[in-house]
Image: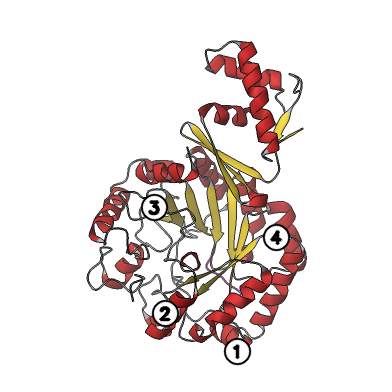
Amino acid sequence: MSYQETVLRSWNQNVLFSALVELTYRCNLDCVFCYNDLGLRGKPMTLDDYERFFQDLAALSCLHLTLSGGEPLVHPRFFDIAAKGRELGFVLRVKSNGHSLQGRLLDRLKNEIDPFVVEVSLHGASAGTHDRQTRVEGSFERLLANLEEMLARGLRFKINSTLTRWNETEIEGMFALAERFGAPLTVDPDVTPRDDGDFSPLELAATPSGRKRLFSYGRDEDVKPHGDAELPAVDSKKHCGAGSSGIAVDPFGNVYPCVQWRRPVGNLHERSITEIWAGNEKLEEVRRLSEDVKRSLPRGGSGMFCPGTAEGLTGSPIPSLPLHPSSKAL
Amino acid sequence: MTSDAAVFRPRPDVRFRVVGDEAVVVRQQDAEVIALNEVGASVLALLDSRRSVGDVLDALLEQYDVDRESLSGDVTRFLSELRDAGVVEEA
């Protein structure tokens, strides 16, 4: 059986295979279009909570674990939490803005955690644009220096970016920068609303010509839909693996089908992930909706459509015509 | 030739999970994914730096209705393949 067949089975048979965990919403940058709901309150997950959660995930056959944020590295117990993930045999990804990835912290990350990959964020091909978006002066130069250091120490990394109207004219330069580091660059073509429903980040959304520029320059694999599509695309009756093979968890234990589909399906302080995953009407509805989305899209097309983003924008995860801007059809 | 006393373990960059009746193996160093069938998954799950090849054979004989001699040949070949593929190493 191939890996693709395994992933297909995880979608069709609801095998939890991939989890994204937002450890904190604190961050050492202040990105203009950040989607995190900074006003969200709740009981934070403790190290013991994470340990139980990770054990349950491993028992459910979950292989991929992504630690995200905010900036996950500013969580005071990041290394303890990540070490639990390593100990339990997950393929670990760390999504970081890259600002603190230097010196001793980088050594610890390499030696104690050994992530499969660190995903860092690039906001432009120039200091003017990058720093304007992060609202931290010097963050661009610091990121480049940190990437050099990561390269020298043999830490695997990839670069993520979101296309905005501020950086859309620098797309070629951003790909050139990625090439300089020998790292893949994945560009998300869409700015999304904040998770609290605030649409103000959309003011920074790329223009139609900027999107066209990206799609004509990047290869298909360089441009990705929203969410955390770590798994290969498979031909399933479902549109995506949200809530079928993957979940996202916020710093307060709320469980969502996907990082982009912020429809709570349970809370880890109340029920274990095993219980949430096994019997849950909300999750079942998400799984049904994923099939509805698949049926409503043109056959073989619109893989870029994101039901989570659509629900955030329109209140419905089902595409309506004309297709949501996440569609690659321009 | 692998002796029954030899002990194998997954290489440090290897992560794997048994999913249903198969194993998904990720070799982080080369970003390579390998899928193993049910028997392969059983063998890999038993390689824990403590069990010898003989112990692995004993454990498999409790799961599968097969004679020890042919199982030993199959497991030896499989371990050799896993070693060549960079999935396991001798402890």
Query: Mark 3 Cα within 10 Å, few/some/many (few <14, many 20+)?
Result: many
> Left of B23 or right of it: where is A254?
left
- Quarter the C terminus of chain A occupies: bottom left
Q: Residue at x 49, y 83 (%)?
A: A168
Mark 1 or mark 2, earlier in chain: 1
Residue A182, horizontal then vertical, whole percent:
66, 67
Name the residue beneath numbered marker 4.
A155
Placement of B44 over or under A278, stated as above or below: above
Query: Mark 2 Cα within 10 Å, few/some/many (few <14, many 20+)?
Result: many
Which segment did they paint magenta?
A23-28
Q: Residue at x 24, y 73 (%)?
A: A322
Labels 1, 2: one chain: yes
Name the residue beneath numbered marker 2.
A211
Name the residue beneath numbered marker 1.
A128
Q: CA distance from mark 2 to mark 4?
A: 31 Å
Query: Mark 1 Cα within 10 Å, few/some/many (few <14, many 20+)?
Result: some
Write down the chain letter for disc 2: A
